[in-house]
Amino acid sequence: MGTLAVIILVLFAALVVQSANIQFFRAPALDASPNNPRNNSSNAKYPRGAIYAANGQLLAESVKVNSAFYPYRRLYPLGSLTSGVVGFSSPFYGEWALESQYNSYLESHPQPPQSFEQLLAPTTGADSVTLTLEPQLQSIARNAMNDPVTGKPIDAAAVVLNPKTGGVLGMYSNPNYNPLPLTSPINTVATAAWNLYLKPDANGFEPLGLVATQQTFPPGSTFKVVTTAAAVVGKPADMTKFFPVGSYTTLPNSNLRLYNSGGGACGGTVAEMLPPSCDPGYALLGLDLGPQLMYNAAVSFGYDQVPPLDLPATAGGAVASYFPPEKSFPNNLAGLMYSAIGQENVRASALQDALIAAAIGNGGVEMTPHLMSYITGPNGKSVLKYKDSIWKTPLTPSQAAQIVPLMRGVVSNPNGTAYGVGFLPQDMVAAKTGTAQTGNIKKNTDDWLIAFAPANDPTVAVAVVVPFQPTANFGATVAGPIVKCLVEGALAIQNGKPPTGTATTCKH
């Protein structure tokens, strides 16, 4: 009998401990959990704060509907144009993207008392969030990302940054989704949309995933600006070293050859090799620099680290780009040569490539990327304002200044790979193209172009990637026109003018 009493006493004590754990210690986490059904449904019972674009355009609002259980429904006036970053607030699936990131501000919550009466009877309300995003740039990107033959959307991603602040001016990807069905008070409607948006397309991309931040691809020759930076910082003598002229170079310890894209001969100094994007010469440059300098340069720009963008990790947040560590190369010098030209195992997101372009244009300073500009309370008073911050400093101003004219040559020199894109001379665009082999059975390419402008005092930096393209396509011909439109559009907006100067290449 005594043993039974002890067992009962132990079980009772365990029950008391677990009850205390749930009710007191774990209560805050459980209350805040998105898996808490009460949280998912309560947000539809009260109006959420609005989300606005940089120009004041409404991106998200709560409207009253004829429903006893869900009296408010979340609406998104621009739909799929901004869904990738704005996300959604669903009574069944909770919050996504920025709706989740700033949920504590957007949902109804106690407000600071403004009077003695409010101190005695506290009020509740929701704050509003204003972004750095420019809807016109979103439209430019969307309209430019159409197949020229079929007119249908193609998988692609574009990121537009303000190099001086890190503010995200544009971030658009295909595929994407219409958030409206997910906000439906009808469970079957929301569930059908949820399941559809989680279904990968032919390239393996889910509409709910944000290609611009969550997918990585071989960056191809856009990575040559990082290889150039490795030379500028770690081995300046290599900037003036003459590399052999030829259409190929032989890989170490083998008879295999690394050919130049297009088969033409190239070589010379770095200043002579970057504009035409000389593959053999840059492969030899990477070999001469060695794995440690190459790795240090990649990491200094943010490779192998997650960019601190204000989006949740599971809902649009950034992933780390990748450059192999030094230990990967002692017995694979051929791999180091390919890595130096953005091939082999090197992978980058569109966000990472935009940050690299922005850093070079901004005197070697890589600002923290962000979407939130400021938050205001129901009374219109400021609640929170974003403070610009530095994420990385890969170069000194004098070191960055050595790379800027080389990227200008990519656009302005007749032998530059972006010479034929058609950038306006007055925009002073500095750029780098990239065409990377994917390694799949179709021998597709991932086509890139990064740029900043004006080169003497950049206010816009852009990266565009169009993955899984036919072998005959190139970064200049596929990604180039999109970047051109975004650069011209951003500069026009910054000068207070409508972005109307790119009608010949983009329908917007």
Image (spheres, grey):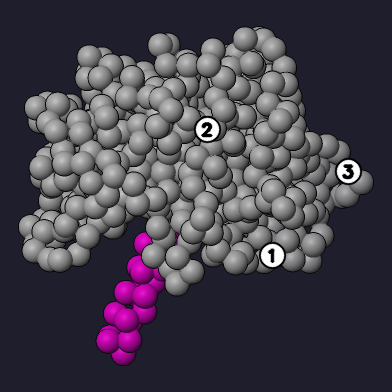
Rendered position, 476 above or below 457: below
Residue, x 51% and y 55% (percent of image)? Answer: 472
Rendered position, 196 above or below 136: below
Residue, x 49% and y 47% (percent of image)? Answer: 474
Side (left or right) of 416 relative to 465:
left
Task: Give residue 196's mark.
Answer: 1
Q: Is 187 in front, or is 116?
A: 187
The residue type indicated by label 3 comes to: Val
Side (left or right) of 268 relative to 62:
left
Side (left or right) of 438 relative to 114:
left
Secondary structure of the residue carrying numbered label 1: helix
Q: Main secondary structure of the magenta part?
A: helix
Rendered position, 57 above or below 438: above
Quadrant into which the C terminus falls:
top right
- Can you give x and y, in whole percent of width and height, for residue 28 in the image? 48, 46
Residue, x 42% and y 16% (percent of image)? Answer: 455
- Can you give x and y, in whole percent of width and height, for residue 137 in the image? 64, 29
Q: Which residue is mark 2?
A: 420
Q: Is residue 19 magenta?
A: yes
The residue type indicated by label 1 comes to: Leu
Residue, x 35% and y 31% (percent of image)? Answer: 275
The residue type indicated by label 2 comes to: Gly
Q: Which of the 4 image quadrants contains residue 227?
A: top left
Q: Which residue is mark 3?
A: 65
Label 3–label 2 contact, CB within 8 A = no
Numbered marks: total: 3
